[in-house]
Amino acid sequence: MSDSPLILPGDPLFDETLLTPRPDWGEVAAKDGDNYAFVVMPGELLPRPVTMAELNEYLEGGAYDEQMIEMEFELDLD
C-alpha cells in the first residue's frame, strides 16, 4: 500500500470502498419514506441510492440489463 490518499484498484481497501454507501444515501431515503435501494448505472463504478420509483425505472427501462451486459463483458476480460 502506498502513502497516496487515493485508493486505487489493487489496494486492499478498493472493493470495500466501492461498496460503502455514498454520504447522501440518507437524503435519498428520506425522499421516499425510507424506502431506497442502491444501483450501479451503466458506465459507473459506484452504487448510488435511488427511490423505489427510480429503482423501478432502472429495472424496467433497460439500465439494469445494460449494466449486466457491461459487467459480464468486464468479467470476461479477466
Image: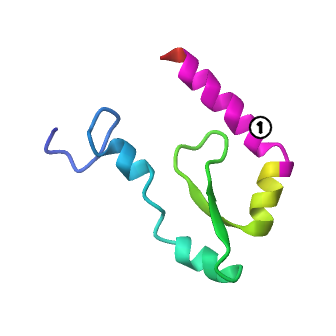
Residue at the right extreme, as displayed? 60
Quarter the N terminus occupies: top left
Say few, some or many: other residues with alpha carbon within 10 Å of mark 1 (under 14 / 14 to 19 / 20 or more): some
Identity of the residue drawn at 81% across and 59% down: 56
Asked if residue 6 lies left or right of residue 77, the reply is left
Count of labels in the image: 1
Above or below residue 65? Residue 38 is: below
Please provide the residue range marked out in magenta: 60-76
Give the residue at mark 1. Answer: 65
Q: Which of 35 and 5 lies nearest the eye of the viewer?
A: 35
Asked if residue 23 lies left or right of residue 12, the reply is right
| Amino acid bearing label 1 | Asp
Above or below residue 38? Residue 2 is: above
Q: Residue 61, how many percent across, how many down?
A: 85, 48
Identity of the residue drawn at 62% across and 39% down: 43
Q: Main secondary structure of the magenta part?
A: helix
Query: Where is residue 10, by image quadrant?
Result: top left
Q: Residue 55, how many percent across, how many down?
A: 75, 59
Identity of the residue drawn at 58% across and 79% down: 27
Residue at the front extreme, as displayed? 35
Q: Residue 25, how many percent across, how many down?
A: 54, 70
Above or below residue 8? Residue 41 is: below
Asked if residue 1 lies left or right of residue 72, the reply is left
Asked if residue 66 lies left or right of residue 19, the reply is right
Q: Secondary structure at mark 1?
A: helix
Residue at the top extreme, as displayed? 77
